[in-house]
Image (cartoon, rainbow, N blue to C red):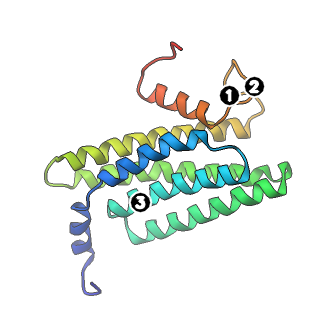
Amino acid sequence: MADMTEADLDQRALHRPLAPVLWLTILVVAVTPFLTDGTLGRTTSVVLVGGTALVALSRSGARRSLLRASELAVGAMALMSILARELGTAQDWLSSLSLGLLSALLLITPLVVVLRLGARPRITLDSLAGLLAAYMQFGLFFSVLYRLVSWVTDDPFFAEQASANAMDYQFFSFVTLTTLGYGN
């Protein structure tokens, strides 16, 4: 495998199945809103969402440098989540930085997946699964971005409630993304 060129690796990446990324993304979207805001819940959420992004990048054949940088970012985010909770509210900048890194990762990941899918010679069911996974990761991106905006501003993000949880941000993100409307 050492004598494989970058082009050979790119060709192999074109044929890696992306359906597992879809199933993992569905699992993360279903589980993360129910995790608590405690140290364990927040760290688990960061690791699950970040890990899903890493799997998506790996399966789509992202460049090694991007994959390594993303791995470091997920590790740093997990560490920042733990430190922010242990050090208290005086370290809110750690939570902001962690959410910022996670939102950047969730913005890059679906773009890489979609670009790699565009290089595939045919549209298959696996290609559609990859596109759906990228779509859902955009939803996760906006969910994290809304949480970051709420975290760094003094005003409540939602007019009806003073404090929101992960489920509220994710619900708002996916309802907006799917254009279902807010008729609840």
Element type at mark 1: loop
Mark 1 and mark 3 residues within 8 Å of each other at the beta carbon: no
Q: Looking at the rendering, in which quadrant would you find the N terminus? A: bottom left
Q: Residue tagged by mark 2? A: 162
**Residue at the image position 68 percent from the left and 28 percent from the top:** 157
Front in this rendered view, residue 113 or 20 = 20
Q: Position of residue 142 (x, y in %)?
A: 52, 38
Report the label total: 3
Mark closer to the chain start, 1 or 2: 1
The residue that appears at 73% across and 40% down in the rendered structure is: 152
Label drawn at residue 157: 1
The amino acid on which the numbered mark 2 sits, given as a three-letter code, is Ala
Q: Disc 3 designates what residue?
A: 55
* Number of the front mark, 1 or 3: 3
- Residue 155, placed above or below residue 159: below
* Amino acid at dot 1: Phe
- Secondary structure found at label 3: helix
Residue 178, visible in the rendered structure: yes
